[in-house]
Amino acid sequence: MNGIWFVLRSGCQWKGLKKESYGASSSLHKRFQERNESGLWKKIYRLIVKYYQKKGRIRWKWQAVDSKMVPAPLGGDLTEPNPTDRAKSGSKRHIWVDQRGTPLSIRITAANAHDLTEIMNLLNCLIVRRPKTQYRVQHLCAGKAYDSEEVRKKLRKRNITSHIRKREYDSNPKPPPLESDKHPARRWVVERTLSWQNDFRSLRTRWAKKSGNWLAFIYISCTLILWRMCSLD
């Protein structure tokens, strides 16, 4: 496990591990993939999310969603030209968090996948059910990339009030919002969680050719983030 943590943290290649410290790198990489194929990393992540929910620490009233594009120099599956990085090969991490920034749902796609097509997939991948009686009104904060009336309608059907930033199609200044329409900034928690994930250099740049291996690293990083949040309470 120390070898896996080191690769996750440093972003180094498996063959870059010191044999005297972590053993044979080929054996370590093989065990990592075997555990990933058995679904171990995903199971651990799901268990800690359920434990976090059992303790009643998930704040469902305000939620947020966002994504992060990352370069993938070695290519592999789920990599496409990044439209924001001179069409270089890249992938994207999608994440759904609660009011405290707890990662509740994770997906990965190619870099050219639009956020509009993934927001409902994220909601369908939630590990724990959203309570229907504890919070009668639940809010979702999102950026301009999710600005779509169709998305708003789908969220309303699920009793979720959307707070999505609208795109500015003209240069005319808009009047200031009414006092009743103002809300404190709440979308920053998902950006903070994405920043926490960037502390793991294997997630900042995708060096894994197999998308499953990269997703396993994301599961491990979210497990560590959740564990820290549990220990802080």
Image (tube, grey):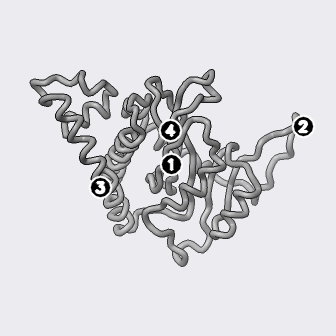
Q: Which residue is mark 1?
A: 95
Mark 4 Cα within 10 Å, few/some/many (few <14, many 20+)? many
Pick whichever of labels 3 and 4 is earlier in the sequence: 3
Q: Which residue is mark 3?
A: 44
Pick whichever of labels 2 and 1 is earlier in the sequence: 1
For the point 61% across and 57% down, the residue is 140
Q: Is residue 43 above or below residue 94?
A: below
| CA distance separating discs 1 and 3 | 17 Å
In front here: 199 or 232?
Answer: 199
Per the image, label 2 sits on a secondary structure element best described as loop
- Give the residue type at disc 3: Ile
Q: Nearer the viewer, mark 1 or mark 4?
A: 4
- Give the residue type at disc 4: Leu
- Give the residue type at disc 1: Ile
| CA distance separating discs 3 and 4 | 24 Å
For the point 54% across and 38% down, the residue is 110
State the mark number for residue 172.
2
State if disc 2 and disc 3 touch (CB < 8 Å). no
| CA distance separating discs 3 and 2 | 51 Å
| CA distance separating discs 1 and 4 | 16 Å
Mark 1 Cα within 10 Å, few/some/many (few <14, many 20+)? many
Per the image, label 4 sits on a secondary structure element best described as loop
